[in-house]
Amino acid sequence: GIQVEQSPPDLILQEGANSTLRCNFSDSVNNLQWFHQNPWGQLINLFYIPSGTKQNGRLSATTVATERYSLLYISSSQTTDSGVYFCAVTSRYSGAGSYQLTFGKGTKLSVIP
Amino acid sequence: NAGVMQNPRHLVRRRGQEARLRCSPMKGHSHVYWYRQLPEEGLKFMVYLQKENIIDESGMPKERFSAEFPKEGPSILRIQQVVRGDSAAYFCASSLLAGDYYEQYFGPGTRLTVT
């Protein structure tokens, strides 16, 4: 099946700093989503972005589908940004299973004051 | 517009008991997915349901686990005779149409602890 790799696995930032999180995937995708899992365990939808660029406040994301990667940018980080960021994809070629989201292992972000 | 609702948020069961997890999809959504997050293992797909139909249960353990999405009411994930290894966070997601081209919206999860 499709492989999803995220980097870096861990990231520590000073409040106010910017960061870029990367997601590489091994095959063509129909769907790519970014999530934030907060320290309470809730999974928050950030972006649905199988291609192109989107922005939402301090967060933005870019997916280059032809090169099989996506980037999540966090600007002016705040302590509330702490948590784990997941990238998840559905594979274009999985047939009946193409709607299953396959998750990466995540990037654990800690923003310190 | 209410999001995906899951209850209970926390569930404690003794070994051998049954656990029932409920999921109400977003209004207008008829596609429901269940995922499990085991400690140190990441999020994994379990089952995909439409109203009154199981479409794909390839990620479900073969025994003790079942899921349904009746015509009326929430989707239910049922775990019989729970064991300690079932302790995990269980997430439900819903989409407007089949999820390969449509965003899946996740609920807050149910944290199951088996003692």
Image: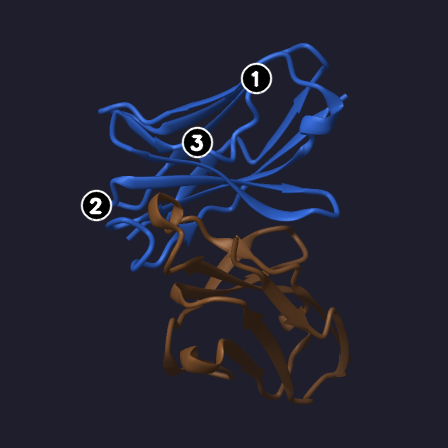
Dot 1: chain letter: B
Which dot marks residue B28? 2
Tell me, for residue B57, which label it has, or none.
3
The front one of B45 and B115 is: B45
Provide the secondary structure element on which disc 1 rests: loop
A89 and A13: which one is in front?
A89
Q: Is residue B111 visible?
A: yes
Residue type (three-letter) at the residue carrying disc 1: Glu
Classify mark 1: residues with Cα within 10 Å, few (<14), some (14-19) or many (20+).
Answer: few
Q: Position of residue A100 (x, y in %)?
A: 43, 48
The chain shown in brown is which? A
For marks 2 and 3, the one nearer the N-term is: 2
In the picture, residue B93 is in which quadrant?
A: top left
Other residues around mark 2 within 10 Å, as few (<14) / some (14–19) / many (≥20): few
Relative to B96, does residue A69 appear above or below in the rendering? below
Residue in the foreground of this view, choosing between B59 and B4: B59
